[in-house]
Amino acid sequence: MRPGGQAVREQAARNAEALIAWAVGARERPLPEPVRRRAATILADDIGAMAAGSLEPQVQRAREGFARTATGAQEATILATGAPRADRYTAACANGMAITWCELDEGFRNASCHAGAYTLPALLAESEARGASVEELLRSLALAYEVTTRFALAYPFPTFNVHPHAAFATIGAAAAVSIARGHDAKTMLGAVTGAASMTFAGPFDTAVEGHLVRNGWTAAGAWIGLRAADWAEAGIAGGGATPHDVFTFSFGTRAFPEKLVEGLGGAWSVANGYHKIYACCGYAHSAVEATLEIRARMGARKPEDIDEIVVETGPGGMTLTTVDPATVLAAKFSIPHAVAATAQLGTAGARAFTHDTLAHAGIAALRRRVRLAPYDELQPAPKDRPARVRLKFKDGEELSALCESARGGADQPFDEPTLLSKLADNAGAVFPAAQPLLAAILRGDGALLSRPWRDVLAGMVRS
C-alpha cells in the first residue's frame, strides 16, 4: 500500500489535473499587473544570475562540450560572452548550468524550491525558438512558477535528504515548455507528470560537500523538461497520480495534495519569491545579516580579536556545518565560512566566496572558531530561518545580534533599484544593454511587452 492510502492518491491525481487545467485556462488571460511585475523581476534577476555563472571556468568548459554535441540549429541564445546560438536543447542546458552557479538566483520562500531556476532555462530557449512575445514569456513564467511551487508545497521533504534542484527542476521545465507550446490540459498533464517520473535523487549534502554536479541538476532538468513535452505530444506521458507516487512512495515525502489547488488564482507564488544579495545558501542569510550588524559595532576591534563565534540557527542552517570547504560551492553552503568571510571582509557578496577566500588565513582561522547551536525559539514563516550571532572577544567582551528573517523575502523585499543594481553588477560585464532593457520590461513598457522575445533578447546581448 502506498503511503497515505488510495483515497489520498486519488485526491492527489484529481488535484494535479485541476492544477494543470487551471494553468491552461489562465494562459489565455492577462496577468494581474502585480503578478506581471513580479514575473519580470524574477526574469531580470535570474538572467543576471545566468550571466554571472557563465563566467566560471567549469561552466565555460561545459559550454564547449555542449557545442560539440549540438544539432547545428541556431534557434536559441546561450547567455554568455558572444551570445552563441544553438538548438533549444543545448541552449537550455548551457543556461541551466550557469543559473545557480553563483547562488544569486531567485528562490521561493514558502518551500525549498527555486522555481525560476527550474523554469527559465527551458522557457527562454523555447520562447525564443517559437517567437513568443515578451508578454507571453512573462505569462508562461508566472504560470509555470505556480505549478512548480505547488508541487513543492504539496510534497515537502521531512529532512534535507534530496536537494530541490534535483526533485523539482524537471517539473518546472516541463510545465514552462508545455505552457509556451500551448498544449491542451491532457498533453500538459502528461508532460508534467512524465517529467515528475524523471526527477532524480540528488542528495542535499552534495551541495554542502561542494560537489559541482549539483550545479548540473538545473541543466539536466531543463533538457528532461523539454523532452517530456516532446514525448507527451507523441503520447508518451505520465498519469495524474505519478507525482504523488514519485514523492511519497519513492522519496518518502509528506503529502498535502490540497496544496496543489488551494487558492488558485488568488494568491500567486511569484509574490512569495525572494531575492539574494548574498552569494550563499539562503539558510545562511540571517547569520550573515546578524554578523554585518555586529561588524558595524566593532569599532576598533579587528577580526583577529575574535575568540569564538556562536551562531544559533534553525534546522536548515544546522545542516551547513563544513569548516574547511573544498570548493566555492561548499563555501556557499557553509555557515562557518559565510560568517567568517563576512566578519573578515565586511561583505557576503560574490567576493566572499571565491577560490582565494578558501585559503585566506584570516578567514580559515575564524571558520574554526565558529560554533553552531540550535535556535530554540523557532517561529512560523517568515521567521523560520533566524539566526542569533554572538562574537566573543579575547578580552572577554561580547557583541550579539539577532536576525529573525533576512531581507529579500516578501516580508522585507529589496526595492527595485536595489535589484536592478544587482543586475547591472552581475550582467554588466557580459551584456551592458541588459539592465536598461529589463528595467523597461519590469516597468511595463507596452512596446517592449508586445515585441518578440527573440528580438528584445538580440538587443540585450548585442555588444
Image (cartoon, helix red, strand yellow):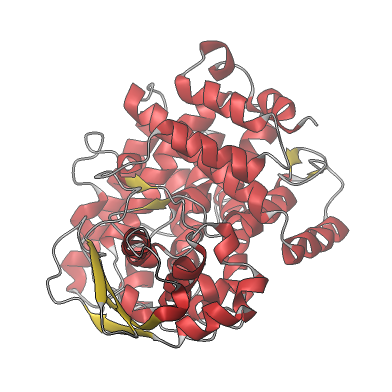
Work out which quarter of the rendered image holds the C terminus and state it. top right
Residue ranking furthest to the top: 447
- The image shows residue 85 at horizontal and vertical percentages of 80, 42
In the picture shown, does residue 331 fall above or below 403?
A: below
- The image shows residue 323 at horizontal and vertical percentages of 48, 86
Horizontal arrangement in the rendering, residue 275 relative to residue 260 (left or right): right
* Total number of numbered discs in the rendering: 0
Q: Which residue is at a point 43% across and 66% down the rendered structure image? A: 164
- The image shows residue 301 at horizontal and vertical percentages of 40, 70
Viewer-proximal residue, 123 or 308?
A: 308
Q: Which residue is at a point 55% across and 79% down the rendered structure image? A: 362
Instruction: Residue 212: tell me if it is visible.
Output: yes
Work out which quarter of the rendered image holds the N terminus and state it. bottom left
- The image shows residue 340 at horizontal and vertical percentages of 46, 74
Horizontal arrangement in the rendering, residue 383 relative to residue 135 (left or right): left
Viewer-proximal residue, 21 or 247?
A: 247
In the picture shown, does residue 450 fall above or below 197?
A: above
Q: Which residue is at a point 73% across and 42% down the rendered structure image? A: 430
Viewer-proximal residue, 115 or 48?
A: 48
In the picture shown, does residue 393 fall above or below 173?
A: below
Instruction: Residue 184: tell me if it is visible.
Output: no
Horizontal arrangement in the rendering, residue 359 relative to residue 337 (left or right): right
